[in-house]
Image (cartoon, helix red, strand yellow):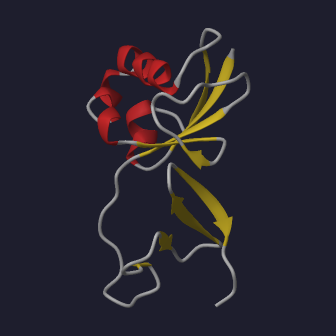
Amino acid sequence: MKIGVLFFGVLKDLAGATAETVDLPEGARVRDLLAHFARGKPRLEAMLPSLAISVNREYAEIDHALREGDEVALLPPVSGGAPEGGPNRLLKNSKSFKFDAPFEIKFETGSSQFARRSSE
């Protein structure tokens, strides 16, 4: 089955591409996709344990089952940001991270989702 993979941040440089299509056997899981990259792109291997992974724009665990045509995004860890109270801030005691973008990522028990940001 064919899986689309998107690379973000420094991963684009390590992978040598912004996107690629990978052919995996039926029943493959995210862990199988990561193993594929550990074998085929050794420069990525060291980063694999710290990646955030989404499948079809929802955060996923490594045991998530993949299906034909899924889109997997590999997101590197990030740090830094604006000073306290700036537009890019982590809201204290909140389960949402707000960015200076038209979406926010909401973390709920067992899953995460992208949502359109409401006007403030």
In terms of image quadrants, where is residue 14? top left
Left or right relative to 106: residue 13: left
> Is 88 situated above or below 113?
below
Judged from this view, the residue extending furthest toward the left is: 46
Place of residue 34 in the rendered image (x, y in percent of width and height, measured from the top left): 43, 24
On-image quarter of the C terminus: bottom right
In terms of image quadrants, where is residue 51? top left
Total tally of numbered discs in the picture: 0
In terms of image quadrants, where is residue 112? bottom right
Place of residue 29 in the rendered image (x, y in percent of width and height, measured from the top left): 53, 22
Q: Residue at x 50, y 27 (%)?
A: 30
Q: Residue at x 66, y 65 (%)?
A: 115
> Is 55 situated above or below 40?
below
Q: Residue at x 55, y 63 (%)?
A: 105
Place of residue 62 in the rendered image (x, y in percent of width and height, measured from the top left): 45, 31
- Residue nearest the viewer, comparing 102 with 28: 28
Judged from this view, the residue extending furthest toward the right is: 69
On-image quarter of the N terminus: top right
> Is 43 situated above or below 84?
above
Left or right relative to 117: residue 107: left
- Residue nearest the viewer, comparing 95 with 37: 95
Q: Residue at x 35, y 74 (%)?
A: 81
Judged from this view, the residue extending furthest toward the top is: 25
> Is 58 situated above or below 44?
below
Place of residue 39 in the rendered image (x, y in percent of width and height, measured from the top left): 37, 14
